Image (tube, helix red, strand yellow):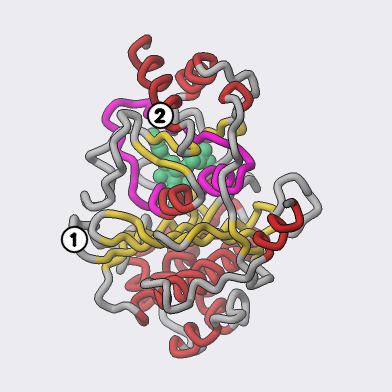
Amino acid sequence: MLARLGALRRQMTSLTSATNPYAKETAVAISAVLKASLVADRVFQKLVSTDSVTKDDKSPVTVGDYTAQALVSTLLHHHFPSYGIVGEEDSKDLKTVQQKVLSDKIVHFANWALDSQAGTDQDHSYWSPIGKEQRTETEWHEAIDRGNAESAATGRTWALDPIDGTKGFLRKGQYAVCLALIQDGEPVLGVTGCPNLPIDFEDNTSSKGTLFVAVKGQGAYQRSFDNEQLTPIHFAPIGSLADASFCESVEAGHSDQSTNARIASLLGITKQPTRMDSQAKYCSISRGDGDIYLRLPVKAGYQEKIWDHASGTVLVGEAGGIVTDMHGKKLDFGQGRTLKANQGVVAANKDVHAKVLRAVQQALADK
Ligand SMILES: Nc1ncnc2c1ncn2[C@@H]1O[C@H](COP(=O)(O)OS(=O)(=O)O)[C@@H](OP(=O)(O)O)[C@H]1O
Ligand SMILES: [Mg+2]
Ligand SMILES: [Mg+2]
Ligand SMILES: [Mg+2]
C-alpha cells in the first residue's frame, strides 16, 4: 500500500496536456512566478535598508516587490494582451525625486532578469519573445502600472501579489510570489512561489524554493524551483480535530490572534499555532504541514485584497480543502480589487471545515 502511494506521489504531471483548459496560462504563469521568485531572492541577497519604502497605508514595499510585478506583468501582457491584471503595486511613488535611487535599482534588477537564464528552465520559450534588450525606466513603470485592472463578475483577470508577506521578506521569513487567473469571479489557476520554503517541511536540509501549482479540476502540486517534476499534494487526513494544528499571520495587526486562540480552545486544540508570513500558509495546509488557516479581521471594515487569497484559494480547493469567509460564504473574487462581499477567511480540510466554522461563529458570538 505504502509503495503504491509512493509511486502515485512520484507520478509526473505536466498540467500542459489536452485535459487542462488553461494549459498555456499554466505554463506562462509558472514561468513568470519562477523568474520573479528568483529575482526577489537575488534582491534580498543585495538588500540594503534604503531599498524599501513605506506606502500611504503604512505597509512596506521594496525593490523586490516592484521588480517582480514589472517582470510578471511584462510576460503576461505579451502572451495574454486581452486579460486584465490586478496587481498590488503601482509606480506613483517611484516617480518622485526622493525615490529615484529606488527606481534605478528596479530598472537594474528587471533588466538583469531579462538577460539572465534564472527561472527560465523548461519554459524558456515563453521568455524568448520578450528579448534581452534593456528596457527604460518609463517602460518598466508602465509594466508595473498595467496591474491597475479591476476583477469583474465575468471575464478573465490575473491577480498578482508580486511579494506577499513583504514584512516576512524583510525579516528573512516566509514570503511568496502569488499569481492566479480569475475566471468569472472565481480563481481557476494558482501559482505560488515560496523562495524560503523547503520542499519538505520535516527536513530542514531539503532544498529551499518551492513552487505550488493548482488548476481547477486538475489537482494541486508542488515542485522545487530547480526540478520540473510536479508532485501531487493533499491535505493531511484528520482523525480527531483536537490533534489539528493551525496557521495564522505573524503580524498581529493582520488577523485576530486572540479570537483564534478561543476557537482553538473550543475545538480542543492544544498545539500552539504556527505563525507564518504570506500565502505560504495556504501552501502549508495544502500539503499537510498544518490543517487550518484562520484569518479573522482585527479592524471591522478591512477589505481583504484579492491578490492575498486568489492563488491560495484554488490550491486549497484542489488539495481537498475548503475556503470560505468567516460567515461560511464563498469568497467572491469578482468584486474589483478587494473581497468586499466577504469578511475574514477560514480554510481547512473539507472533512472538518463545517466544524471549524461553527467554532468560529461561537467565538465571534462570545466576543
Ligand atoms: N489590517 C490588515 N488586515 C489584514 N491583512 C492586512 C492588513 N494590512 C495588510 N494586510 C495584508 O496582509 C498581507 C500579509 O499577509 P500575512 O498577514 O499572511 O503575512 S504577515 O503576517 O504579514 O507576514 C499583506 O500583503 P503584502 O502587502 O503583500 O505583504 C497585506 O496585503
Ligand atoms: Mg504590500
Ligand atoms: Mg499580500
Ligand atoms: Mg505584496
Q: Nearer the viewer, residue 221 or 101?
A: 221
Q: Nearer the viewer, residue 228 or 179?
A: 228
Question: Is residue 97 visible from the viewing direction of this image?
Answer: no
| Residue located beneath label 2 in the image | 354
Question: Is residue 357 visible from the viewing direction of this image?
Answer: yes
Q: Residue at x 33, y 49 (%)?
A: 306
Placement of 228 over or under 60, stated as above or below: below
| Residue located beneath label 1 in the image | 154
Q: Where residue 278 appears, x then y in whole percent?
A: 51, 45
Mark 2 CB lies closer than 8 A to ligand 1: no
Q: Is residue 256 magenta?
A: no
Q: Is residue 305 magenta?
A: yes
Real-space Cα separation, disc 2 to disc 1, in angstroms: 29 Å
Q: Where residue 226 appears, x then y in whole percent?
A: 68, 70
Q: Residue at x 56, y 36 (%)?
A: 291
Amino acid type at mark 2:
Ala
Q: Residue at x 58, y 61 (%)?
A: 211
Q: Which residue appears farthest toward the right when viewing the image?
A: 205
**Quadrant containing the C terminus in the rendered view:** top left
Q: Where residue 87 appears, x then y in whole percent?
A: 35, 59
Q: Are marks 2 and 1 in contact (CB under 8 Å)?
A: no
Q: Is residue 333 left or right of residue 241?
A: left
Q: Circle 2 sits in a helix, a strand or a loop, which is it?
A: helix
Q: Around disc 1, counting alpha carbons within 10 Å, would you say few (fewer than 14), some (14 to 19), or many (20 or more)?
A: few
Which residues are drawn in magenta? 281-310
Placement of 50 over or under 157, stated as above or below: above
